[in-house]
Structures are given as structure tokens and as C-alpha cells.
Amino acid sequence: MARVFSGIQPTGDLHLGNYLGALRRFAAEEQSPDAVFCIVDLHALTVPQDPAALRARTLQTANLYLASGLDPDVCTLFVQSHVPEHTELAWLMECTASVGELRRMTQFKEKSASAEFVSGGLFTYPALMAADILLYDTERVPVGDDQRQHLELARDLAIRFNGRYGDTFVVPEAAIPTVAARVMDLQNPTAKMSKSVDSPQGTVLMLDDPDTIARKIRRAVTDTGTDVRYDPDTKPGVSNLLAILSAVTGTPPGELAGRYQQYGPLKADTADAVVEVLRPVQARYRELEADPDATLAVLEKGAARARETASVTLARAHGAVGLLPRSR
Ligand code: AMP
Ligand code: TRP
């Protein structure tokens, strides 16, 4: 099995895009003893967070990973801040990245354009993300389409570092799904579904109750005309529903389109399919939520396991750049 790493920020409520683009794939396709999954709480701090909310959301995100089917006896699940090697390697990555390439990151441009206060951390965010990945000799990084550019930078940094200091890091590759890599907002199907955009009716949350999910999908904005075709450019609303239904059922979106003459039945079937795919996840989540100590124990064990690998990689990187060893 390839070595796999991925992370999710404990900010906002996790939504259908997070589930289809990330969580569900982690559990279904990526689990193995070589897979490492992280709750990237330090990345969350790049924008202001309420401490109590961050604590609650970190635990909630861990429970959603587990509820989605991740088995902590098979793979490793941990919280980024519990493994100090992440911030230590991030420094070396900051010193490997140029200001120019960090400035070109579209996520930074978007987030800084609308923010009143732009932290230094928001700017160096991709260097920390590169550190997350490189610490585990990662080969595959399953993410949604919005992380493509960050992944490309992580690769560039690994290659540059190896070129300067000799072979130190494995150069990772992004694994982006062919369908539902970018689930769109149901009310604004030209923008991605997002935790940070205030569009409650356009965002299906993983923990929304079945009636709410069905209502949001039935009221999704569709396109002019009445024909059902999969064409994200000219029919973004309908294509988004087809992509969601496709991700849940496994039938290609073009084939699904041929089964519908009208929007109504497509919406009804998509609503039913999403309700049913989330139902067991929600039930398992409620069980996990009732026993926070059990989840904390999972995370503690996960961090210890992650450190075994991370500390070896960090020592290798420190040695490569010429830092004196801490112990002999
Ligand atoms: P984030 O919510 O930014 O921490 O993202 C966690 C994971 O979900 C990453 O792999 C993202 O690429 C993925 N993701 C976030 N939003 C979407 C979306 N609208 N469609 C598909 N994947 C997404
Ligand atoms: N930046 C990612 C996001 O917002 C989260 C993330 C942090 C991540 N470190 C990572 C994803 C390492 C994959 C691998 O979605």
C-alpha cells in the first residue's frame, strides 16, 4: 500500500463536500496501516478562533472521521498540535519556500482579500501543510480539488530541498477524485460548498437532520431550460446534483443524466441518496459523541504512533541542513 496522508481543519461544520471529497474516500479507499489522518488544528489558527469552539470542533472532527468509517486500529488518527515535529519541520519549509510562491497561492489571495486582519500564519500556511505531508514519507495525498495548488507547492518544496541537501523527502502526489472533487454550493453552483462561506441553505452539513438535508437539496438552484444534462459549464446546478448522486451511487454522472427528463425527480433521488448515505454516519457519530474520553484516548495513541515516524524524518531533515544532532 502507498503511504497516505491527509488533513481536515477543525473549523466550521463539516459538509457534504468534505464528506464526498475527503472523509468517505479516506474510509473506503485509503485505509491501511500506512495511512495517516490528521485534524489540523494549527492550520485553523491562521484565522481567529474562539478557544472553546476550537476545542469542541477538534473533538467533533475526530468523531466525524471515526463515524465515517476510519478504524484507528488500522490507520493513524491524531491532532496536529500533539505532534510538535509538524511546527518544527514547518520552519524548514518556510525557509525553503519563496515569498513569491507563497504570494501566488489562490487560497491566500482569496482569504486575505476579505479579511480585516491577515496573520503571518495565513501566509505561511502552505509551508506547514508541506511539513504535514513530508513528515510521513507520504506518497499519496487524497484531497478535494481546492487543495491542488497547495499540493503542487509541497512537491516543489520537497524537490528543492532534496536538490539542495540531498535526498531527504519522498515527493508526494495528489489523489483528487474524478467525481465530486468540488461539490458546489446548492444556492450558488458556481462557488464551492465551503465551511467559511455563509450560505446555510446552500450547504448540506454532515450532521443536518434528514428533513433539512432533503429540503436543501429540493430547493437547490437549477439552471434555465428543463433538460437534464451533465455539463458543469453550462448547467452548473444540475451537474452538481448529478455529481453528488454519482459520488453516492457510483454510477457515472452522464449515465445518470439519461435517466431523468425533469429536475424534480433528480432532486428527489439525490435528496434520498444523500440522506441514506449520511444516516449511518450520523448514528455512529451520536454514539461517539457520548463518550469523549474514548475519542481522546484514540487521539493520544494516534499521536504517539505518528511521532515514531515524524521524529525520524525531522532528525533526517535537521541533519541534512546542517543542524547539530540533539543526541548522540
Ligand atoms: P477543509 O474543510 O478545507 O479542511 O477541507 C478538508 C477536505 O475536504 C480537503 O481535502 C478538501 O479538499 C475537501 N473539500 C473541502 N470542500 C470541498 C468541496 N466543496 N468539494 C469537495 N471536496 C472538498
Ligand atoms: N489545507 C487543507 C484544507 O484546507 C488541510 C490540510 C492541512 C491538509 N494539511 C494537510 C490536507 C496535509 C492534506 C494534507 O483542506
Image: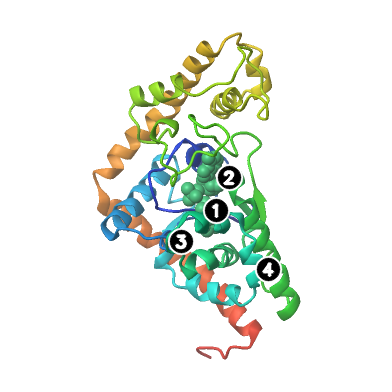
Mark 2 lies on a secondary structure that is loop
Q: Determine which of the numbered discs, if any, sits on residue 144 in the image.
A: 2
* Residue kind at label 1, given as amino acid type: Glu
Disc with the residue nearer the chain's start (4 vs 2): 2
Of residues 62 and 47, the one nearer the viewer is 47
Vertical placement of 33 versus 23: above or below? below
Q: Position of residue 255 (x, y in %)?
A: 67, 18
Disc with the residue nearer the chain's start (2 vs 1): 1
Disc with the residue nearer the chain's start (3 vs 1): 3
**Pointer 2 with pointer 3, Cβ within 8 A:** no
Mark 4 lies on a secondary structure that is helix
Cα–Cα span, label 3 and label 4: 20 Å
Cα–Cα span, label 2 and label 3: 17 Å
Residue at image coords 66%, 62%: 153
Q: Please indicate, yes or no, whether residue 31 appears anywhere in the rendered image.
A: no
Q: Is mark 2 within 8 Å of ligand 1?
A: yes
* Residue kind at label 4, given as amino acid type: Ala
Disc with the residue nearer the chain's start (3 vs 4): 3
Disc with the residue nearer the chain's start (4 vs 1): 1
Residue at image coords 48%, 64%: 306
**Pointer 4 with pointer 1, Cβ within 8 A:** no
Q: Position of residue 136 (x, y in %)?
A: 57, 64
Mark 1 lies on a secondary structure that is helix
Q: What residue does disc 4 label? A: 158
Of residues 149 and 166, the one nearer the viewer is 149
Q: Is mark 3 within 8 Å of ligand 2?
A: yes
